[in-house]
Image: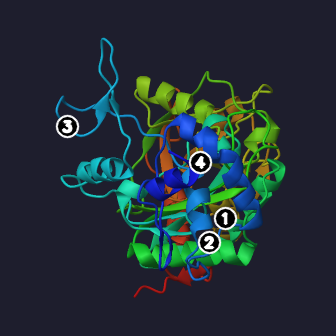
Amino acid sequence: MDYWSWVRLLGRTSERGVLPTCGFMTLGLSYTINTKAKQLHESHPPLLPRQSKTHPKYSIACVASSLIVVSSQPRGAMGSYVQGEDEVPVYESGAEIVQKLQEKWKSTAAPFPAMYSSVLGGIILDPAMMSVPLDDHMVHRGHGVFDTAMILDGHLYELDPHLDRFLRSAAKARIGTPFPRDTLRSILVQMTAASNCRRGSIRYWLSAGGGDFLLSSAGCAGPAFYAVVIPTDYSQCRHGVRAVTTSVPMKPPLFATMKNVNYLPNVLSIMDAEDRGAFASVWVDGEGNVAEGPMVNVAFVTAAGELVLPAFDKILAGCTAKRLLALAPRLVESGLLKAVTTRHIAADEAKRCSAEMAFVGSGLPVLPIVEWDDQLIGDGKVGKTMMALSDLLWEDMKSGPDRIAVPYK
């Protein structure tokens, strides 16, 4: 079969833009058409949904960046088989793959109502089609960054601060962007509207892009942007949890201060905490100072009434933590706090002198910690100051100034 026959088999272009009939391929075919697809991608960068026009060239770029799917099925089902001790189906038709993927979701509720992919150039509502190319360097080299924003009562909370941090992370990781900041922001708002999700979060990624399986990103066709909506029925946390100091080494400052996709230390640290019967872990740096949690900041209220957060020079500057620092002076005015500061705080000092402790993060926003390494924090109960801080953040999330009304249809 010649090159263009493969293209006609694997992709088609709809009136609204690129809608691949087969978004998945074998490694051999991906290698065969990859060079041509890269050239087309460079001369025809991904379009926004409203900019897309019917053009077969975009189908090629889409197909060349598609994910490889290998799955087993009973004998007699669709797909031919290779000979061997264990028979593995070989899918030669794009229609077979699409059918197989869609069958998966017939009996399962779709967990994610919307995704955006710059590879496709649009918003995807069919969960069977939500994928990331296997040759994307974010997948096989970890060359990608991400960030989040919360959806509460149909509003996106603090999207702009998160988006600014997102682009700072991308710059540190030497990843470009296929669109300017305003376009990225517009895509995220439109995707949230298309999802019809009123409470949850969005997560979005910038990747070096697809193109090959080498270490260098020099061969990538260009940066890729992905995003997804994650429905979550979260609420304000009012219970206390246990924390432990993890033995998993923390990331060095260069990587800890950018929100990149290399989260294996974070994963291992949370597994370490779960194995020890705790909710989450706390990193302590080589100098004995408190650093951060696996995906949250840590806050303390000392016995003297001072709110202390570890300095951000070696850890990720959490957007929620920074917002907490901006709101907390209200409690100084009311007399509940004496001072608000960020500084290096030794773990021994924090355990000995803290009346209250908490994790701080977007989906919490404040989660009290009542026990750390089998030692009670204060009297071992949820404290009134942390709950007052939680109330400040929760009210800001529900009615504060940094909210974007999602234009649902």
Q: How many marks?
A: 4
- Going by the numbered disc 1, the residue's amino acid type is His
User: Which label was assigned to residue 296?
Assistant: 4
Q: Which residue is mark 3?
A: 77
Q: Residue 312's spot in the image, x, y percent? A: 78, 49
User: Which label was assigned to residue 158?
Assistant: 2
**Residue at coordinates 46% horizontally, 66% vertically from top-left?**
19
Single out the mark in the foreground, 4 or 1. Answer: 1
The mark nearer the N terminus, 1 or 3, is 3
Single out the mark in the foreground, 4 or 3. Answer: 3
User: Which label was assigned to residue 162?
Assistant: 1
- Going by the numbered disc 4, the residue's amino acid type is Val
Report the Cα–Cα distance between label 4 and label 1: 14 Å
The secondary structure type at the circle numbered 4 is: loop
- Within 10 Å of disc 3 (Cα), the crowding (few <14, some 14-19, many 20+) is few
The secondary structure type at the circle numbered 2 is: loop
Q: Residue 163's spot in the image, x, y percent? A: 69, 66
The mark nearer the N terminus, 3 or 2, is 3
- Within 10 Å of disc 1 (Cα), the crowding (few <14, some 14-19, many 20+) is some
Residue placed furthest toward the top:
85
The secondary structure type at the circle numbered 1 is: helix
CB within 8 Å, label 1 to label 2:
yes
- Going by the numbered disc 3, the residue's amino acid type is Ala
Q: Residue 60's spot in the image, x, y percent? A: 59, 58
